[in-house]
Amino acid sequence: MSAPDVFIGLMSGTSLDGVSAAAARFHPHGARFRVELLAHVQHPYTDDQRRELRAVMREAKARDFCRVNFDLGGWLAEAALACMAKAGLKASDIRAVGSHGQTIWHEPPHSTLQIGETAVIAERTGLDVVGDFRVADVAAGGQGAPLAPIADALLFSAPSHWRALQNIGGIGNVTIVPPGGALDGIRAFDTGPGVAVTDAVVESLYPGTTFDRDGHLSRRGKAMSEVGWPRN
């Protein structure tokens, strides 16, 4: 019997905190899958890298888009290789790399744009690379986000009851999944601002700090219910 497939996932989030890479092995488990995390690395962006990415999100020339697209592909490849090394994996152990890329502009249902050149990742890692997940969803008439409802159902559904899975990324979203890994009835939608807003607030109030590490700043405050927040 062949070994379960191992994949590497790459992500650069809306809040521009850095590049994350995870190596995971997937085991079939009835209608669901059990995931075994083999290694995880996170490479924070330097100030220069963050400025480069922010520039192409606002106004930039074609040359700037071209350069940062290849630069980010290289940063993603470095994270993938570091993750493989941490897990003790060889290229022959990996089925494929999945790379979401960095969203530069998102305007559904018309269009969306992610960068992080997959050809650069493939060349530097020697692995097959799959990308443009959000582009494919918008091209098929979707909103491009939330993007992982089927994975949520296959990996995290409960045996006998419905479950809600809340993701607090750059923008928060929730996936409602039926029991037992069933795909019929899945619902997913955005729930409001996430770390893209909170990180910007932290950076504005505490210069030199890009995010609220371990929630230390948040712990200084009180929950809304504790300060008499009005309820309907």
Image: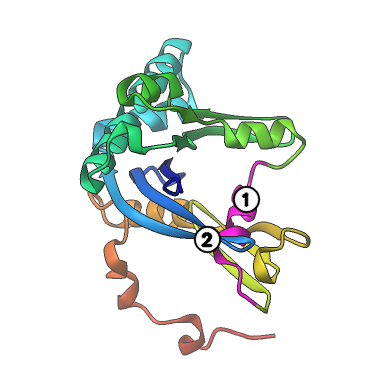
- Determine which quarter of the picture holds residue 221: bottom left
Left or right, residue 79 beside residue 224: left
Marks counted in the figure total 2
> As shown in the figure, which amino acid type bears the numbered disc 2?
Asn
Residue 147 inside the magenta-drawn segment: yes
Residue wearing tag 1: 146
Question: Helix, strand or loop at disc 2?
Answer: strand
> As shown in the figure, which amino acid type bears the numbered disc 1?
Pro
Q: Is residue 61 above or below residue 93?
A: above
Question: Helix, strand or loop at disc 1?
Answer: loop
Residue wearing tag 2: 167
Q: Position of residue 18 (x, y in %)?
A: 33, 43
Residue 36 inside the magenta-drawn segment: no
User: Start and end of the magenta stretch?
Assistant: 144-159
Q: Position of residue 217 (x, y in %)?
A: 29, 69
Upstream in sequence: badge 1 or badge 2: 1
Which residue occupies 32% across, 76% down? Answer: 219
Which residue occupies 59% across, 36% down? Answer: 133
Which residue occupies 36% across, 47% down? Answer: 23
Q: Are marks 1 and 2 in contact (CB under 8 Å)?
A: yes
The disc label shown at residue 215, or none:
none
Q: Nearer the viewer, residue 93 or 219?
A: 93
- Determine which quarter of the picture holds residue 93: top left
